[in-house]
Amino acid sequence: MLRLSWQPEAADYIEAFKARNKRRRVNWFVGLLSAIGFAFAVLAIVARQPGPAVIGVLAGVLFPLAVPFVVKSSTNALWRRNPALQQPVQMVVDARGAGGDAPVIMMNPGAMHVMTGSVQHQWAEIGPVLETGRVFVVQLAGQRNKVFFLLAKRGLTGPAQEESLRRLLLR
């Protein structure tokens, strides 16, 4: 049995959303938008339209540059609007699953909800787990990865516990 206890930070959630975007292949979509912007610019140059060409080049350059900024700013806004994300977290992970007091993020089209209170999930309910330098992003099975909670690595006592947690989560 592993006990985790930590004070959440906005950076935990920023890393979680970056990992989720990478898993969802958001960068592929951003690359496609960027390529469309550059293609638009080439067509505008061929048509001798400098104004639209500049717009195409800007779109091609700015889409990829904007994604990290959008993730960080939207996550910071979520952090400020939801005091529940800022409360101390206590979790236990054992052979049965994961449970304790942790905020759970539910992603719906156009809205995000933070559910608070006690979390108790058996291993059969836990879906893919993503790992970052700071956290494990525990996604629930059968929810199309739209519901998740975090386990912060700093909530562990050391590298041996981190390795034990990794073995439990990433099996």
Image: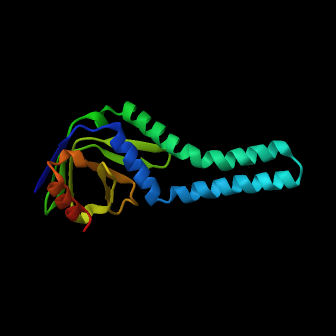
In the image, taking residue 119 as reference, residue 131 lies left or right, namely: right
In the image, taking residue 95 as reference, residue 171 lies left or right, namely: right
> The N terminus is located in which quarter?
bottom left
Picture coordinates of residue 24, whole percent (x, y): 47, 59
> The C terminus is located in which quarter?
bottom left
Foreground residue, 112 or 136? 136
- Give the farthest residue toward the right: 48
- Quarter of the view holding residue 114: top left
Q: How is the model colour-coded?
A: rainbow
- Identify the residue at horizontal 44%, vertical 49% (top origin): 108
In the image, taking residue 166 as reference, residue 160 lies left or right, namely: left
Picture coordinates of residue 63, whole percent (x, y): 61, 47
Tag count: 0
Can you say whether 152 is above or below 79 in the image? below
Picture coordinates of residue 92, whole percent (x, y): 15, 51
- Identify the residue at horizontal 31%, vertical 31% (top origin): 83
- Identify the residue at horizontal 46%, vertical 40% (top origin): 72
Picture coordinates of residue 101, whole percent (x, y): 20, 43
- Identify the residue at horizontal 14%, vertical 48% (top origin): 157
In the image, taking residue 148 as reference, residue 41 lies left or right, namely: right
Can you say whether 46 is above or below 112 in the image? below
- Give the farthest residue toward the front: 159
- Give the farthest residue toward the left: 1
